[in-house]
């Protein structure tokens, strides 16, 4: 009874501990900022390539183990019995038990092992290339969503400012300081801001759904904050030849070409079916009363070759190798061009951000000047509305420039084959 109570207490304690861990995990998920890296990891876990990766690696390991075996296929057991019991019934009996061992062709085992190693490397590089493709999609959706969030926030601020200005104009119209036409202009500016906010909400909803389809949850849901900082700027290599050893897309094509070459080399030695070594023992007698005799049989079976049977397999493997090598050359050229374009885009985005920040600062200062002069009656409403519009456009341009710079750096990292950080 004491032991039963002890187990019950341990079970209750374990359940409480697990419940506390889950609660803490949910609390962290709700309070921790969502980052681009977390969005990528969530999207990658939903990809078919990620879900099948473990099975592919297990299959590659099984092929490697098969290449290390002493026989090309598992041995076959043969058992037979012969008797004259159904016709003469003179006591003739024969029992045979043997085993057939499929043998490797000359050079087949080493080339099969080389092919298995190449396929194992290709499995890993294929997963890395799939991760990079997923990262490209997530990065594009992420920064589109960030732009939509910025646009919505700026549109909301513009609407708040327009409503505040319209309220001030209404008060001054009632006091006789401004005409009714000024009221219409202020209300029209507020209505324009409402339209802009509605458009921004639509764009944000669209971008949110696109990102949600990738990562499996609505970003910013459940009260979670969003990490708006960009990725660290990467170091651009002076020699693009280094991409051959680091870029997942290049490595994938290199490994594909290697698999095709190894497959062609294997097909060159597989000119016929595999020979078989046969070992058998026979126990027989001729008539009733004769003693059983024991014999041993050793034999080997050599199948004839068939050139047409293996020519198609070897030709297909060579064609795949040529295709992969051709794609590799084109991919190298494309990567160099994309890398140069991404580098120039980052430099241009940095210049645009500097100019946009300067414009936004000047627009804010001008708005402060004209806001004060408008309250003092030294400037008219159309001028005030124009200055407000310029200030809002300056803030919008500066905010977009910051997002564009972060997106350009992210694109440069994508071109270099780096995953989100």
Image (cartoon, rainbow, N blue to C red):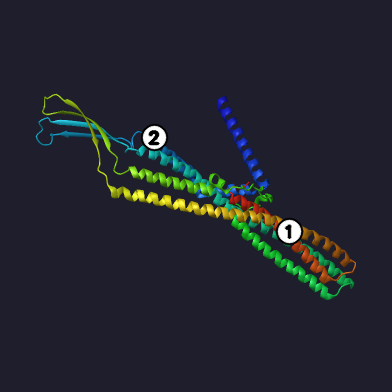
Where residue 416 appears, as percent x and y from the top left, is 59, 49
Residue at the image position 88 percent from the left and 64 percent from the top: 372
Q: Nearest the camera: 231 or 288?
A: 231
Marks 1 and 2, how far apart at CA: 63 Å
Residue 345 versus residue 53 in the image, above or below: below
- Report whether 100 appears left or right of 185: left
Q: Residue 23 or 417: which is nearer the viewer?
A: 417
Residue 378 position in % (x across, y down)? 89, 69
Q: Do the residues bearing badges 1 and 2 touch, measured as CB atoms within 8 Å?
A: no
Up-down: is 208 above or below 72?
Answer: below
226 to 160, vertically: above or below: above
Q: Quadrant of the N terminus?
A: top right
**Residue visible at 82% across and 66% down?**
165
Residue that carries the numbered disc 2 in the rendered image:
68
Residue 112, quarter of picture: top left
Percent coordinates x, y for residue 357 in the rendering: 76, 57
- Left or right, residue 249 beside residue 395: left
Q: Residue furthest front?
A: 239
Is residue 55 shown to the viewer in this render? no
Task: In this rendered view, identify the residue nearer to me: 93 or 3.
Answer: 93
| Residue 105 location (% of width, % of height) | 31, 38
Residue 101 falls left or right of residue 147: left
Q: Which residue is mark 1?
A: 398
* N-terminal-most mark, 1 or 2: 2
Residue 121 as seen in the image, left or right of residue 71: right
The answer to whether residue 152 of the structure is visible from this angle is yes
From the viewer's side, name the closer residue of 379 and 201: 379
Return the mark for residue 419. Answer: none
Helix, strand, or loop for circle 2? helix
| Element under disc 1 | helix
């Amino acid at each position: 009874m004491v032991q039963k109570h002890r187990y019950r207490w341990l079970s209750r304690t374990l359940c409480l501990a697990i419940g506390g861990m889950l609660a803490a995990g949910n609390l962290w998920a709700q309070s921790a900022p969502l980052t681009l890296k977390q969005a990528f990891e969530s999207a990658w876990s939903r990809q078919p390539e990620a879900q099948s990766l473990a099975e592919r690696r297990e299959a590659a390991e099984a092929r490697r183990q098969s290449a290390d075996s002493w026989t090309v296929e598992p041995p076959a057991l043969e058992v037979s019995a012969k008797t004259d019991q159904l016709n003469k019934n003179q006591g003739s009996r024969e029992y045979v038990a043997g085993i057939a061992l499929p043998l490797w062709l000359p050079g087949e085992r080493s080339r099969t092992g080389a092919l298995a190693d190449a396929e194992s490397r290709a499995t890993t590089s294929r997963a890395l290339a799939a991760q990079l493709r997923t990262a490209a999609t997530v990065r594009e959706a992420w920064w589109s969503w960030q732009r939509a969030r910025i646009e919505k926030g700026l549109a909301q601020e513009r609407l708040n400012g327009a409503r505040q200005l319209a309220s001030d104009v209404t008060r001054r119209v009632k006091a006789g300081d401004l005409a009714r036409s000024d009221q219409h202009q202020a209300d029209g500016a507020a209505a324009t801001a409402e339209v802009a906010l509605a458009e921004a909400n639509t764009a944000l909803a669209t971008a949110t759904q696109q990102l949600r389809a990738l990562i499996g949850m609505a970003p910013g849901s459940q009260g979670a904050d969003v990490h708006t900082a960009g990725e660290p700027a990467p170091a651009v290599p002076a020699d693009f030849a280094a991409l051959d050893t680091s870029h997942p897309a290049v490595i994938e094509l290199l490994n594909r070409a290697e698999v095709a070459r190894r497959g062609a080399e294997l097909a060159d030695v597989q000119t016929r079916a595999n020979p078989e070594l046969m070992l058998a023992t026979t126990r027989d007698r001729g008539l009733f009363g004769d003693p059983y005799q024991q014999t041993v049989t050793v034999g080997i079976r050599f199948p004839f070759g068939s050139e047409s049977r293996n020519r198609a397999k070897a030709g297909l493997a060579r064609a795949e190798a040529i295709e992969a090598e051709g794609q590799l050359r084109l991919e190298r050229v494309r990567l160099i061009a994309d890398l140069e374009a991404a580098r120039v885009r980052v430099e241009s985005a940095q210049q645009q951000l500097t100019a946009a920040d300067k414009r936004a600062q000047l627009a804010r200062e001008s708005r402060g000047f004209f806001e004060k002069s408008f309250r003092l009656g030294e400037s008219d409403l159309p001028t005030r509305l124009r200055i407000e519009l310029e200030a809002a456009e300056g803030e919008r341009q500066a905010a977009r420039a910051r997002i564009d710079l972060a997106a350009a750096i992210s694109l440069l990292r994508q071109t270099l084959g780096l995953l989100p950080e």
